[in-house]
Amino acid sequence: MVTSIKTTTKPATYYILLIIAFIGFYGSLLIIFARDTTLARGGVLPLSNALTYMALLLPVGCAFYVDPMFRSWLTSPWGICYILAMIYYAILGILQEFDALFFASDLYLVIALLTGMALFRLAMRLPNPEFHFSVPALVSTFILHYAYLYAVPVSEVFESARLLTQNNIGYVYSAVLLPLTGLGLGTLARKNLVWFGVFLLSIVIHVYNGVLVGSTRSIALSLATVLLFSTVGALYKIHQGVITKAKSVYGKSIILAVICSLGILLAILSGNLFATSSTIAARQNDDTGALRIIEKDSAFAELSDFQYYFGGGLGHTFQSTQGYESSALHISIYTFWLKFGGIVFWPIAIFLYIVMPLTFFIAWLKPDYFDSKLRSAILVVLPGLFGWVFLLSISGGYSEHSFLGAGFSLGVFLHVKQQGLYPLLPTSRIKTFENSAQ
């Protein structure tokens, strides 16, 4: 008796969609990689603007075509409102006095939020999604280190001499790594020791370049914020694709390693460790905070009554107190006010500084308050975003790269809220080191 073995053949459309997803994901990252490594060396990339638009829009178009979930996000009332607002503020900027170069950079920024969401969805469509999920963090870590290889010494007003990367590439990649590090610690680092080692190495490279070599306090403090809040989710066991209320044995090991990393970072910042290798401790006396407040006040003094309430639109610039034209304040949270006006700034500020922290602490201290998937999304995604919000509050964070990371985080949040942590973390179908260690 011959037993036939039934095999299933996937339709041709499956492979077509797979190819489109692959092109959208890696095509975008390849263009960004080529552009930013060139800028890190101080070079100029031909057709830079066209390539940037291609890098940002390619994954959005591909994800819209291949992924129903991304289509549903983009065509939801929130998605439509965001696109309409983006068009409105683009028109508003064009109708007012604006700089074409800064207009392009602002347009990159608002598109990048959608690009980050699209990149996440494309990663989920590819085989072995956990690997593709990690690629943006790995590429960002490499470019960060690469940028500091070409860093040059500078001495700014009221600042100690230090090394800065060309075209600010090191700093913007430090910013994008904040949410990506938080996501990595909350997901793949829980899977096994190999993935935990990968993200721990990324943190070490981040600290070495941004804190030791670059002597940048905002990098140290924002990364410390991510590490601190990432310990909360690691307290609990993951089962059936959600963070439970049961304490995790493996998570305690992650917490110990993260706390050690946090202690080393703060010791470097205070000058108690590697004091001879970095000027970061000496920079504690630099009076840059006062200069940034003066810069903010000066920029607001240039606003008309209309701009104060409704914004200057994309491409709006101001004359920096340091003698150059700029489109973003050092205290970047106020840049939202300059671009979009007080009517948009205050809801954003309330959400970032009140709603997000309150939601996080409720999810932590009252685990039954939220649905288990929503609670998992909160504990996994928000630690990285807290680092970005901290950066916005002291220096930087308003860039295309930061919004790319924020969009990636938003994609993770919406996915986990709907489907749990699968396929990144265990369900009943996946056995991990954490499950075997309980």
Image (spheres, rainbow, N blue to C red):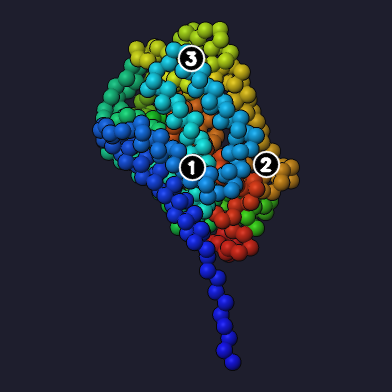
Amino acid type, label 3: Leu
Q: Distance of mark 1 from mark 2, alpha carbons?
A: 35 Å
Q: Which of marks 1 and 2 is in front?
A: 1
In the image, residue 78 lies at what x, y percent?
63, 34
Q: What element carries label 1?
A: helix
Q: Is residue 238 left or right of residue 258?
A: right
Task: In this rendered view, identify the residue nearer to me: 437 or 323.
Answer: 323
Q: Distance of mark 2 from mark 3, alpha carbons?
A: 44 Å
Whether pointer 1 and pointer 3 mark residues with C-beta atoms closer than 8 Å, the reply is: no
Task: In this rendered view, identify the residue nearer to me: 60 or 16.
Answer: 16
Q: In this view, does 362 lie to the left or right of 95?
A: right
Amino acid type, label 1: Gly
Question: Residue placed farthest to the front in the image?
Answer: 12
Q: Nearer the viewer, mark 2 or mark 3?
A: 3
Residue at position x 45%, y 38% in the image: 57
**Label 1 belongs to which residue?**
61
Which picture quadrant has residue 287? top left
Among numbered discs 1 and 3, the one appearing first in the sequence: 1
Which picture quadrant has residue 433? bottom right
Residue 359 appears anywhere in the view: yes
Give me the disc on residue 95. 3
Question: Residue placed farthest to the bottom in the image?
Answer: 1
